[in-house]
Amino acid sequence: MLSIRTIIPLVLLVPLAAALPAADNPLGTAMAGGDQLWERGDLIVVLHDAGEQAGVPHYIWRLRDQVGRVRPELELVFQSEWSGDARGLASQVTGQVIPRQPALVVIAAGQAAALVGVEEKKAEAKPEEKKEAKPDEKKEEKKEEKKVDTGLDPAGFAAQLKESIDKLKEAGIEVVVLGPSVVSDATEAKTPADEKVEAFARLAGEVARAAEVPFVDLRAPCLDYLKTHPAEGGKPVLYAGERRYTAAWMELAGTLLAKAIGERMAALPMRIDIQDQPFIERAQIEIPLRRLRKGAKPDIYYTLDGKEPTVKTARKYDGKPVVIAGGASVTLRVLAVDAVHNSTASAKAVFTKVKARPGEALPRRELGLDWALWQGSWPQLPEFSASKPVATGTWHAPELAAFRENPAYAALSEKLGLRFAGWIDIPQEGVYTFETTSDDGSRMWIDDELVVDNDGGHGMRFRSGRVALREGLHKVRVDYFQGSGGLGLEVWWSSEAGIRRSKVPDNAWVRNPAKPHDWNPPPPKKEKDAKESKKPEPAKK
């Protein structure tokens, strides 16, 4: 992926079918393996389902332009991805977008689901021999036939949509529901698929209104458009088939969606983006303000003594970094005043002075890490060192994109665990933020201290932690396990010492060829030692 802060806003595209340990990251991406460095924008827009319908990235570009016309003052970010049903969407978004980052999710409800099972069931249907049936039996057959044609599961559809909305709102993320449009270029619903879309549109609106989130109705505007723009020369007007939509559909849907996004974000208050963090001797802190109100040019005031800032007593922020230095900890408090909209925002962050850990030297060194692989099924990372691995070797980095081609991994594919061990070469003293993005769980230790905890069974997500390190080699260990389904592992870093957020390069991973890692489990205690360590039982009375 590429840095697109000034190019594209952020969007996750997914169809609806049936806490950071030490520091927050700006934004994770659900698709590992790229080289994108996510920049902080004023708003993260997450779009559910529409890209798969449009079939091409052109829809993203169109929507970016349309949202930009509605809210030109906002810096936005987009991304595309397919991830399953609405429950999967909620889990991925809440795992990637941090609470302090303004975010909005657009759930395009039921669009792809409207076609699921309809054609397949038609193809599977075979003519049967005619036989006499009683009138009551004929009625039952007609009811069953209608149920198969529509393939509609109202309860399941509504439950998924509601659960997704509830989870996103609970995480502090704004939601807009985008209703389905059409599956054929007809002004009236005629096919079972069209009937299903109509039913899904009605259900989506009911769920959205009950949850008090905006609902964008696409079906009615699309049908109105078809009445005034009939097909010419057999070319599709809105629906191009195979779940793909035309440029006209992109323009129509994008305009309505951009308007809804702009109106929703205009109603949100300002947010000040600061967070707790350590520093070694001094830190330079910027105070980003999320400009969610059009025309807002707020004044920002701050204090460094922990006292509540006021317009009269606090220092006014001039846009230059605030220097933090001195004592063991410094409490920064910030106040933003928007006179245009008569609103305020406040925030607090504690900056703690720490000592950087010293690095070490190796008599011999070469690039890469030692690795070991275990076979097993776990709900979370086990203690790998308690058992002997099934395979070992060396690899260039703790990653899974290329390692999946390793014969030892390919032989198992799922239900396995990995450990990478060695050293990481720190180029310059500073406070470093390390992140793992993984599916399923991962953890990272530096100098035998847990820095990143991304454990548990989950989809691709980022978790991060901070540690102060001096220049040199630092002992590192990365554990990972894969349950089933999606998979991936990457390690990222950034530092005040001049390292921009990026994947850790291969030349930063180091191993000792003279002393490979010992993967054998510790020997069991001898019977004599076990008896000596056993406490004597109290004498019976």
Image (tube, rainbow, N blue to C red):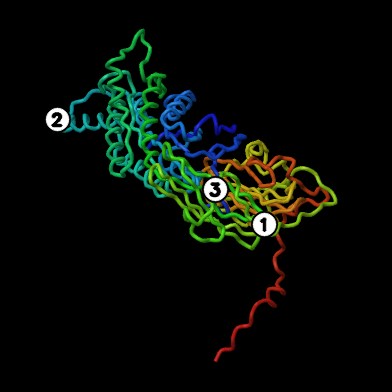
Query: Callout 1: 10 Å neighbours few (<14), some, many (20+)?
Result: some
Residue 435 in picture, x, y percent from top left:
61, 47
Relative placement, left or right, of 501 versus 333 is: right
**Residue 184 in the image: above or below residue 95:** above
Farthest right residue in view: 363
Q: Nearer the viewer, residue 278 or 239?
A: 278
Marks 2/1: CA distance?
70 Å
**Residue 72 in the image: above or below residue 376:** above
Relative placement, left or right, of 267 versus 291 is: left
Relative placement, left or right, of 82 versus 398 is: left
- Name the residue that disc number 3 marks: 317
Q: Are marks 2 and 1 in contact (CB under 8 Å)?
A: no
Instruction: Tell me the kind of residue under disc 3.
Output: Tyr
Q: Residue at x 46, y 26 (%)?
A: 65
What kind of element bears circle 1?
helix
What kind of element bears circle 2?
helix
- Name the residue that disc number 2 marks: 135
* Residue 116 visible in the current orientation: no
| Mark nearer the N terminus (1 vs 3) | 3
Farthest left residue in view: 135
Q: Are marks 1 and 3 in contact (CB under 8 Å)?
A: no
Q: Which mark is residue 385?
A: 1
Marks 1/3: CA distance?
52 Å
Indicate which label's residue lies in the foreground, 2 or 1.
1
Farthest bottom residue in view: 541
Indicate which label's residue lies in the foreground, 3 or 2.
3
Q: Nearer the viewer, residue 537 or 438?
A: 438
What kind of element bears circle 3?
loop
| Mark nearer the N terminus (2 vs 1) | 2
Q: Where, quadrant-wise, is the C terminus in this rendering?
A: bottom right
Indicate which label's residue lies in the foreground, 1 or 3.
3
* Residue 272 visible in the current orientation: yes
